Amino acid sequence: MRTTIQAELTATGRLLAQLLAVSTLVSVFVSVATQSVATGGAVPAMTLMSYVFSTLAYDEANGWQGFRLTLPISRQNVVVGRYLASLAVAILSALLGAAVACALSAVASTLGADSYLAPLVLTEETHKTIWAVPALSVAAVLVMVDVMFPLGMRSGLTRAVRLVPVVLCLLFVGGGTLVGNDGPLSAAMADIVAMIEGGGSVLPLVVGVVVIALVLHLVSMLITVQLYARREL
Protein backbone atom coordinates (compact mmCIF):
# COMPACT_ATOMS: atom_id res chain seq x y z
CA MET A 1 0.00 0.00 0.00
CA ARG A 2 2.87 2.34 0.80
CA THR A 3 4.30 1.77 -2.69
CA THR A 4 0.93 2.59 -4.24
CA ILE A 5 0.58 5.88 -2.38
CA GLN A 6 4.18 6.83 -3.19
CA ALA A 7 3.57 6.16 -6.89
CA GLU A 8 0.38 8.22 -6.77
CA LEU A 9 2.08 11.17 -5.09
CA THR A 10 5.07 10.97 -7.41
CA ALA A 11 2.81 11.30 -10.43
CA THR A 12 0.46 13.95 -9.08
CA GLY A 13 2.30 15.68 -6.22
CA ARG A 14 3.34 18.74 -8.20
CA LEU A 15 -0.10 19.00 -9.78
CA LEU A 16 -1.75 18.82 -6.36
CA ALA A 17 0.39 21.69 -5.11
CA GLN A 18 -0.66 23.76 -8.13
CA LEU A 19 -4.33 22.92 -7.60
CA LEU A 20 -4.16 23.95 -3.95
CA ALA A 21 -2.44 27.22 -4.87
CA VAL A 22 -5.06 28.03 -7.51
CA SER A 23 -7.87 27.13 -5.10
CA THR A 24 -6.41 29.47 -2.51
CA LEU A 25 -6.33 32.38 -4.94
CA VAL A 26 -9.84 31.70 -6.22
CA SER A 27 -11.15 31.32 -2.67
CA VAL A 28 -9.67 34.70 -1.70
CA PHE A 29 -11.11 36.35 -4.82
CA VAL A 30 -14.60 34.89 -4.29
CA SER A 31 -14.59 35.80 -0.59
CA VAL A 32 -13.63 39.41 -1.32
CA ALA A 33 -16.00 39.73 -4.29
CA THR A 34 -19.00 38.33 -2.40
CA GLN A 35 -17.90 39.73 0.97
CA SER A 36 -18.56 36.30 2.46
CA VAL A 37 -15.92 34.01 3.91
CA ALA A 38 -18.44 31.17 3.90
CA THR A 39 -18.86 31.37 0.13
CA GLY A 40 -15.12 31.51 -0.43
CA GLY A 41 -14.59 28.65 2.01
CA ALA A 42 -16.55 26.32 -0.24
CA VAL A 43 -14.33 26.93 -3.29
CA PRO A 44 -11.39 24.66 -2.32
CA ALA A 45 -13.75 21.67 -2.41
CA MET A 46 -13.38 21.66 -6.20
CA THR A 47 -9.70 20.82 -5.72
CA LEU A 48 -10.79 17.25 -5.06
CA MET A 49 -12.74 17.02 -8.31
CA SER A 50 -9.85 18.46 -10.33
CA TYR A 51 -7.41 16.09 -8.64
CA VAL A 52 -9.48 13.01 -9.43
CA PHE A 53 -9.94 14.02 -13.06
CA SER A 54 -6.18 14.54 -13.30
CA THR A 55 -5.34 11.14 -11.81
CA LEU A 56 -7.69 9.41 -14.23
CA ALA A 57 -6.13 11.36 -17.09
CA TYR A 58 -2.64 10.30 -15.96
CA ASP A 59 -3.72 6.66 -16.31
CA GLU A 60 -4.15 7.13 -20.05
CA ALA A 61 -1.04 9.27 -20.57
CA ASN A 62 2.24 7.74 -21.72
CA GLY A 63 1.30 4.24 -20.62
CA TRP A 64 1.42 5.16 -16.93
CA GLN A 65 -1.39 2.77 -15.99
CA GLY A 66 0.35 -0.24 -17.50
CA PHE A 67 3.72 0.75 -16.05
CA ARG A 68 2.25 1.14 -12.58
CA LEU A 69 1.04 -2.45 -12.65
CA THR A 70 4.62 -3.63 -13.23
CA LEU A 71 5.41 -2.39 -9.72
CA PRO A 72 5.07 -4.87 -6.82
CA ILE A 73 1.47 -3.87 -6.19
CA SER A 74 -1.85 -5.52 -6.98
CA ARG A 75 -4.81 -3.98 -8.73
CA GLN A 76 -6.65 -3.91 -5.44
CA ASN A 77 -3.82 -1.90 -3.90
CA VAL A 78 -3.97 0.52 -6.83
CA VAL A 79 -7.65 1.19 -6.20
CA VAL A 80 -7.37 1.39 -2.41
CA GLY A 81 -4.35 3.67 -2.66
CA ARG A 82 -6.17 6.00 -5.03
CA TYR A 83 -9.20 6.20 -2.76
CA LEU A 84 -7.00 6.92 0.26
CA ALA A 85 -5.18 9.62 -1.70
CA SER A 86 -8.47 11.22 -2.72
CA LEU A 87 -9.64 11.14 0.90
CA ALA A 88 -6.43 12.89 1.96
CA VAL A 89 -7.00 15.55 -0.70
CA ALA A 90 -10.57 15.98 0.56
CA ILE A 91 -9.30 16.66 4.08
CA LEU A 92 -6.69 19.10 2.77
CA SER A 93 -9.36 20.92 0.77
CA ALA A 94 -11.63 21.32 3.79
CA LEU A 95 -8.77 22.56 5.95
CA LEU A 96 -7.72 24.98 3.21
CA GLY A 97 -11.22 26.45 3.00
CA ALA A 98 -11.33 27.06 6.75
CA ALA A 99 -7.76 28.40 6.80
CA VAL A 100 -8.44 30.93 4.03
CA ALA A 101 -11.54 32.15 5.85
CA CYS A 102 -9.65 32.59 9.12
CA ALA A 103 -6.75 34.36 7.39
CA LEU A 104 -9.06 36.79 5.59
CA SER A 105 -10.91 37.47 8.82
CA ALA A 106 -7.63 38.26 10.57
CA VAL A 107 -6.60 40.65 7.81
CA ALA A 108 -10.02 42.33 7.69
CA SER A 109 -10.06 42.83 11.46
CA THR A 110 -6.92 44.96 11.23
CA LEU A 111 -8.44 47.31 8.65
CA GLY A 112 -11.25 48.62 10.80
CA ALA A 113 -15.04 48.46 10.69
CA ASP A 114 -15.30 50.96 7.81
CA SER A 115 -13.15 49.02 5.34
CA TYR A 116 -14.49 47.14 2.33
CA LEU A 117 -13.36 43.86 3.90
CA ALA A 118 -15.19 44.45 7.20
CA PRO A 119 -17.92 41.87 6.37
CA LEU A 120 -15.21 39.20 6.25
CA VAL A 121 -14.54 39.49 9.98
CA LEU A 122 -15.85 36.39 11.71
CA THR A 123 -18.71 36.96 14.15
CA GLU A 124 -20.17 34.68 16.79
CA GLU A 125 -22.62 33.26 14.23
CA THR A 126 -20.16 32.83 11.37
CA HIS A 127 -17.67 31.12 13.68
CA LYS A 128 -20.07 28.18 13.83
CA THR A 129 -20.36 27.85 10.08
CA ILE A 130 -16.82 28.62 8.96
CA TRP A 131 -15.76 25.02 9.46
CA ALA A 132 -19.14 23.57 8.51
CA VAL A 133 -19.26 25.05 4.99
CA PRO A 134 -15.92 23.58 3.81
CA ALA A 135 -16.77 20.22 5.39
CA LEU A 136 -20.20 20.02 3.76
CA SER A 137 -18.86 21.21 0.40
CA VAL A 138 -16.06 18.64 0.39
CA ALA A 139 -18.49 15.90 1.45
CA ALA A 140 -20.76 16.76 -1.49
CA VAL A 141 -17.84 16.67 -3.94
CA LEU A 142 -16.65 13.40 -2.40
CA VAL A 143 -20.02 11.83 -3.25
CA MET A 144 -19.61 13.01 -6.87
CA VAL A 145 -16.12 11.52 -6.91
CA ASP A 146 -17.51 8.23 -5.61
CA VAL A 147 -19.76 8.12 -8.66
CA MET A 148 -16.95 9.00 -11.04
CA PHE A 149 -14.28 6.61 -9.75
CA PRO A 150 -15.97 3.30 -10.66
CA LEU A 151 -16.76 4.54 -14.17
CA GLY A 152 -13.30 6.03 -14.69
CA MET A 153 -11.35 3.07 -13.33
CA ARG A 154 -13.44 0.57 -15.28
CA SER A 155 -13.81 2.31 -18.63
CA GLY A 156 -11.15 5.03 -18.63
CA LEU A 157 -11.56 8.78 -18.50
CA THR A 158 -12.49 9.09 -22.19
CA ARG A 159 -15.65 7.06 -21.71
CA ALA A 160 -16.28 8.17 -18.17
CA VAL A 161 -16.62 11.85 -19.12
CA ARG A 162 -19.58 10.87 -21.28
CA LEU A 163 -21.33 8.91 -18.56
CA VAL A 164 -20.53 10.87 -15.40
CA PRO A 165 -22.57 14.01 -16.32
CA VAL A 166 -25.60 11.84 -17.07
CA VAL A 167 -25.31 9.96 -13.78
CA LEU A 168 -24.77 13.16 -11.78
CA CYS A 169 -27.76 14.84 -13.44
CA LEU A 170 -29.94 11.86 -12.52
CA LEU A 171 -28.69 12.06 -8.93
CA PHE A 172 -29.40 15.81 -8.75
CA VAL A 173 -32.88 15.36 -10.20
CA GLY A 174 -33.58 12.47 -7.85
CA GLY A 175 -32.26 14.40 -4.86
CA GLY A 176 -34.28 17.47 -5.82
CA THR A 177 -37.40 15.34 -6.06
CA LEU A 178 -36.82 13.88 -2.60
CA VAL A 179 -36.28 17.23 -0.87
CA GLY A 180 -38.66 19.29 -3.04
CA ASN A 181 -41.92 20.81 -1.87
CA ASP A 182 -43.84 17.56 -2.27
CA GLY A 183 -40.93 15.19 -1.70
CA PRO A 184 -40.81 12.64 1.12
CA LEU A 185 -37.80 14.41 2.68
CA SER A 186 -39.09 17.98 2.29
CA ALA A 187 -40.12 18.21 5.96
CA ALA A 188 -36.70 17.04 7.13
CA MET A 189 -34.97 19.56 4.86
CA ALA A 190 -37.20 22.36 6.17
CA ASP A 191 -36.26 21.41 9.74
CA ILE A 192 -32.55 21.51 8.86
CA VAL A 193 -32.84 24.95 7.26
CA ALA A 194 -34.82 26.25 10.24
CA MET A 195 -32.18 24.89 12.63
CA ILE A 196 -29.37 26.66 10.78
CA GLU A 197 -31.24 29.95 10.38
CA GLY A 198 -32.32 29.83 14.00
CA GLY A 199 -28.76 29.67 15.23
CA GLY A 200 -28.90 26.01 16.22
CA SER A 201 -25.86 23.77 16.29
CA VAL A 202 -24.81 22.52 12.87
CA LEU A 203 -22.53 19.87 14.35
CA PRO A 204 -25.05 16.98 14.08
CA LEU A 205 -25.75 17.91 10.46
CA VAL A 206 -22.07 18.08 9.52
CA VAL A 207 -21.23 14.83 11.30
CA GLY A 208 -24.15 13.05 9.67
CA VAL A 209 -23.29 14.25 6.17
CA VAL A 210 -19.59 13.42 6.58
CA VAL A 211 -20.36 9.93 7.88
CA ILE A 212 -22.69 9.26 4.95
CA ALA A 213 -20.03 10.50 2.51
CA LEU A 214 -17.40 8.23 4.10
CA VAL A 215 -19.69 5.21 3.95
CA LEU A 216 -20.41 5.90 0.27
CA HIS A 217 -16.66 6.30 -0.28
CA LEU A 218 -16.08 2.83 1.18
CA VAL A 219 -18.88 1.28 -0.86
CA SER A 220 -17.59 2.94 -4.03
CA MET A 221 -14.09 1.62 -3.31
CA LEU A 222 -15.34 -1.95 -2.90
CA ILE A 223 -17.24 -1.70 -6.18
CA THR A 224 -14.26 -0.21 -7.99
CA VAL A 225 -11.96 -2.98 -6.72
CA GLN A 226 -14.21 -5.54 -8.39
CA LEU A 227 -14.57 -3.57 -11.62
CA TYR A 228 -10.87 -2.76 -11.97
CA ALA A 229 -9.92 -6.40 -11.39
CA ARG A 230 -11.85 -7.34 -14.55
CA ARG A 231 -10.58 -4.50 -16.71
CA GLU A 232 -8.44 -5.44 -19.68
CA LEU A 233 -5.45 -3.14 -20.13
Image (tube, helix red, strand yellow):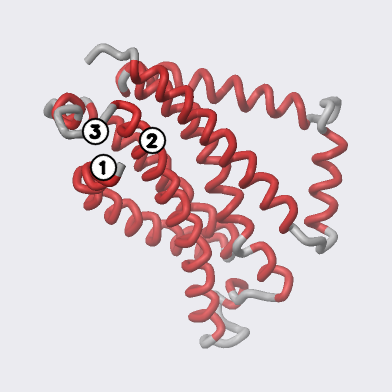
The amino acid on which the numbered mark 1 sits, given as a three-letter code, is: Glu
- For image coordinates 48% across by 61% down, the residue present is 95
Indicate which label's residue lies in the foreground, 1 or 3.
Answer: 3
Q: In the image, which disc is placed on residue 73?
A: 3
Please name the amino acid that badge 2 sits on. Answer: Val
For label 1, the SS is helix
Q: Which residue occupies the foreground of this view, 178 or 8? A: 8
Q: Residues within 10 Å of mark 1 (few under 14, many from 20)?
A: some
Q: Position of residue 125 (x, y in %)?
A: 73, 70
Whether the residues at callouts 3 and 2 have beta carbons within 8 Å, the answer is: no
Q: Quadrant of residue 139?
A: top right
Residue 119 % position (x, y) = 62, 73
Q: Amino acid at mark 3?
A: Ile
Q: Is residue 98 above or below residue 5?
A: below
Q: Which mark is residue 80?
A: 2
Residue position marked by numbered label 1 in the rendering: 8
Q: Crowding at label 3, few (<14), some or many (≥20) Cα neighbours within 10 Å? A: some
Instruction: Please state the horizontal and vertical placement of residue 130, each as a whole percent of the image.
Output: 61, 64
Q: State how far apart marks 1 and 2 are (Cα).
A: 11 Å
Q: Horizontal and vertical percent for residue 120?
A: 58, 72
> Of circles 3 and 2, which is in front?
3
Answer with left or right where residue 172 lies relative to residue 187.
left
Q: Which of the two labelled residues, at mark 1 and mark 2, occupies the earlier sequence position?
A: 1
Residue drawn where x is 35% and y is 20% of the image: 228
Near-viewer residue (31 or 19): 19
Mark 3–mark 2 Cα distance, whole angstroms, equals 11 Å
